[in-house]
Image (cartoon, rainbow, N blue to C red):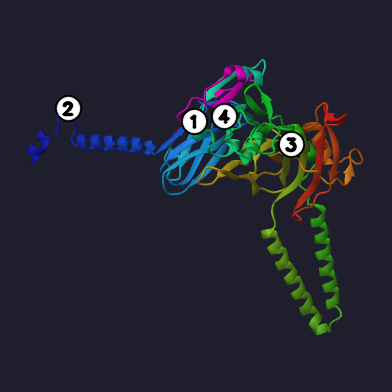
Amino acid sequence: NTACSRQAVAPGFPAGAPARLIGVICLLLWSIASAAQVQVSSPLEGYYRPGKFMPLRVRTAAYGQFVIRPDNGIATQVMLSAGQHDLIVPLLLMGTNRQIRYRLENGDGGFADTELRTLGDDQRLVGFVGSPDVPFARSLFPGASIIPLKLPAATAMAGAAAAWNTLDALVVDGDTLGEARVGELIAAGITLAVRSADKPAGRWPWTLSGACWVLRADPLGPVMAGENQPALAPVSGWEADWPAPFRRRVLLYGAVFIVLALGTTLLPQRWAAMAIIVVSACATVAVRVWATDHPVVLRKTATVLVRSGAGQTDRWIWLAASNPGPATVPFAGCTLPLFQGPHWQLMGVTLVCDSAGLPRFYELNMRPELKIAFVSRTGVARPEEAVLTTAAGQTADPIDRLADRAYLQPGWQIAGKRSGVSASIYIEDWGTVVLERPIIGPQSK
């Protein structure tokens, strides 16, 4: 037996080497098979613009928590259900990035199969569903350098519209977008062009340009995520103090306790001591329950309504905390995070998507002395006629500072405001400010 075992070993290999070699080969094959379970690629050939979402195509049969993380940006988390997946998910990149990592719940991971390329300020990325038409793209963005991309119709229409935020324009053949999708793409800052003889259906103010119907995305206000001091100007002096309704409730509860405590003095002496102990114990338990249930993170909210041909509604949320604590912010339309300074990475902001790759909410861990803002933009075909309770210029408040520093451009003005209604005593709603162009003659200039 010893002789046979020695003859089975190749000359120059120590005993047990074949078994180890087979083990290494099996491990290598297993790693390759695990990596093949996930394919992450860029429909936009790796082009991205810092501060905007880029779409990633994820094909996998894995399930559970799936996290995509750039070198510099906001991580995206997808909760995959069982089965085969072919998804378009959004990823928000900031600054310079060289690669994108992903990791599965079982610990396996890898890198996206794409070379990242940053778009310059003078470059415009135009997607074509159909044959590319570079001269027409140049007419949309005169003087800019055009980068044309041909996109399959099924891919371009997949996923959340916000995921395609990097595109500057999208050109499609025929009226195939649908009115709701048009609003979502406009909210994402994407100019739309439809090659059709007939005007696209719906209420959007399309204009004819050559052989295309064009709807320009020209939003007011922030269009990129990242550090933005004007967006945080309304809360520059906010020290995470409790809103006035909450403070009033605390005073009310304190007054009730004092009344009950004084009432115990009217009882017979042998019962008074026991009554004051019971009242104090109940108050202590109530305070304890409140301390564990009330939110640590405080919020202020406001709405900016832009009345124009293709209007917009921006819903703002500002967060601050006096103690560390978790927070979530819903994703609606195209929701961008805006930061006060370079320490935003300490919050661990993550965009959470469902099993279809659609963004649902941000989750983060607030830190004392750090503030963050989120703006959720939706497109409006016919801006509502807001009922204004305050005329322009009558009062100066935080939303005036927001409008003045982050929105107003030459030719725009504050038409008026209306009061807000807070959904909870922990949230202070500053109301709505309405922006519009002044009317000069029969048309707005």
Q: In the rendering, at what x and y percent does residue 432 appear? A: 80, 44
> Which is nearer the N-term, disc 4 or disc 2?
2
Is residue 233 within the magenta segment? no
- CA separation in Å, label 4 and label 2: 66 Å
- Left or right: 68 with respect to 362? left
> Which residue is under mark 2?
12
Quarter-wise, where is residue 407 in the image?
top right
> Which is nearer the N-term, disc 3 or disc 1?
1
Q: Which stretch did the figure color magenta?
A: 111-136
Residue appearing at x 85%, y 45% in the figure: 388
- As shown in the figure, which amino acid type bears the numbered disc 1? Pro
> Which residue is under mark 1?
152
> Which residue is under mark 4?
172
- CA separation in Å, label 3 and label 4: 22 Å
Above-or-below relation of 14 to 245: above
Which is in the foreground here, disc 3 or disc 4?
4
Which is in the foreground here, disc 3 or disc 2?
3
- As shown in the figure, which amino acid type bears the numbered disc 3? Gly
> Which residue is under mark 3?
311
Q: Secondary structure at mark 2?
A: loop
